[in-house]
Amino acid sequence: MTAESAPPSRVRRVAVIAAPPVSMFNLAIPEMLFGKVEIDGAPGYETVICAPDPGPVTTAGGLDLLVPRGLDAVEEADTVVLAGGGSSADPDPRILDALRAAAAAGKRIASICTGAFALAEAGLLDGRAATTYWAYRSLLAARHPAVDLQDDVLFVQDGPVLTSSGYAAGIDLCLHVIRTDHGAAVANTVARLALVAPVRPGGQAQFTQTPLPPERGASFADTRAWAMEHLDEPLGLGDLARHAGVSVRTLSRRFHAETGVSPLQWLLHQRVERAKELLETTSLAMDGVARASGLGTADSLRQHLLRRTGLTPSAYRSSFGHASSSGHMSSAGHATAPAGSGTVPPSRTS
């Protein structure tokens, strides 16, 4: 049974392999994010860190971490994550054997940063789209020419195998896993609890959207939060400028400096993200999704979703929907999920 087909009531098990010298940051990401998932008041994941030799494991920073579990933890897991580290050469043969066995058993397998080298060495990336930390992409391409290496993406999913680029992109990968398992609302809640950016598409084959650049300022943070509360309204530059207390020209210049995109581009991105969340977590008709997300009509929704994801709204809901038939709209025009569904109302943060 794969992770995707596991019973929803069962806690999903994640084994994180620490290959020395492991990055402490990369190692902490899965535990930090998966550990914040709660479904109906119970943990959604059980995360275990393991290593070929239980005991002290050297980190890239020169410290030793005590890892009590061996690679037998991989056999018990639904998802296996290989944390990157300070070495991309000569992966431990025991790790390669564990990865191959996990793949043969149909488990979901992921890597963060340079962990992709071990996946490639194990033969799991041959013919698949994959990525790694940008500074090592040319080396990975030279060593493993059968890998369909992707540039300028946060992460890539090709079937049950996921790879991320460097450092913080591991956060995006783990949030994507949570979104796949439990829906956008749960993943966005975890992002808020971890004080990281909301779920961002990584550039996997079925998605063509480029994620928003990292924000570089907060002077308009209140205005962005206000806009997120009013996405279903016909907001324009004048509305944003009035809320921020500046001229339209100043808003446009400083908003772009902070977010890397224009105010209207930012609004469109957030509206498409809200539409995707509504498609996943409610049973609203397409016109209702379009109105609640500020995209206007079902035709407009279809146009923007096709451009961003390559999927029609109905196909997207079929692939990623987690709603029951009782999903409905609140009096404020925002989607609400049925009680006990394991989801929460859409994100209200920027």
Image: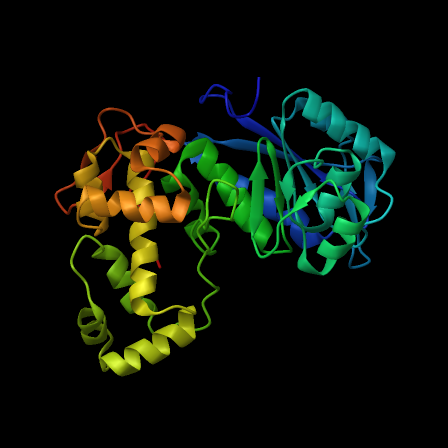
Instruction: Report the number of numbered marks.
Output: 0
Residue placed at 84% from the left, 31% from the top? 94
Q: Between 102 and 152, which is closer to the camera in this rendering?
A: 152
Q: Position of residue 324 (x, y in %)?
A: 28, 25
Residue placed at 18% from the left, 70% from the top? 239
Q: Position of residue 342 (x, y in %)?
A: 36, 31
Left or right of 73, for residue 183: left
Q: Nearer the viewer, residue 98 or 164?
A: 164
Where, by quadrant of the figure, is residue 331 drawn? top left
Q: Is residue 22 visible?
A: no
Image quadrant occupied by the C terminus: bottom left
Q: In the figure, 14 relative to 170: above or below?
A: above
User: Which percent across, then down, holds residue 78?
Assistant: 60, 26
Confirm whether residue 305 shows in the render: yes
- Viewer-proximal residue among 99 and 196: 99
Side of 318 relative to 176 (left or right): left
Q: Residue at x 14, y 47 (%)?
A: 332
Left or right position of 73 against 216: right
| Residue 96 position in % (x across, y down) | 80, 33
Residue at 43% of width from left, 69% of height from top?
A: 260
Q: Is residue 13 left or right of residue 189?
A: right
Rendering quarter of residue 252: bottom left
